[in-house]
Image: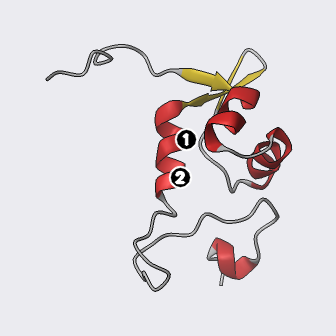
Amino acid sequence: MSNPLTGLPPRLLRTKEAARFLGISIRTLEKHRTYGTGPTYRKIGGRVLYAVEDLQAWTAIGARKSTRDKTAGTVFPARPLTPEERGDC
């Protein structure tokens, strides 16, 4: 079965909608944007917009099958990253 959304532009959400989609507070999403630890966003005409696909990709980084899963990525907390976390070492 083909995807009915194929060929349509990505659905863009404002910060409030994106935070609700992710299940986090608006303030936490804003902090992620400030610190560069959050999902990719777009700035269009002064508005901050998030594509649903970008939100899903960001959450997929932390997907894991168990607590011992070594292949899982890290979704960092909404705070400034240390040089080690940034990979500056």
Q: Is residue 73 left or right of residue 7?
A: right
| Residue 10 location (% of width, % of height) | 46, 22
The C terminus - image quarter: bottom right
For the residues labelled 2 and 1, the Cα–Cα distance comes to 6 Å
* Three-letter code, disc 2: Thr
Q: Badge 1: few (under 14), some or many (20 or more) residues near its Cα, within 10 Å?
A: some
Q: Label 1 near label 2: C-beta < 8 Å? A: yes
Q: Vertical placement of 75 versus 36: above or below?
A: below
Task: Residue 65: name its quadrant.
Answer: bottom left
| Residue 12 location (% of width, % of height) | 57, 22
- Outermost residue to the left: 1
What residue does disc 2 label? 59
Q: Vertical placement of 74 versus 37: above or below?
A: below
**Dot 1: element:** helix
Q: Name the residue rendered at 14%, 23% in the picture.
A: 1
Q: Name the residue rendered at 59%, 42% in the picture.
A: 40
Closer to us: 83 or 33: 33
Residue 72 is marked as none
How many marks the image carries: the answer is 2
What residue does disc 1 label? 55
* Three-letter code, disc 1: Leu
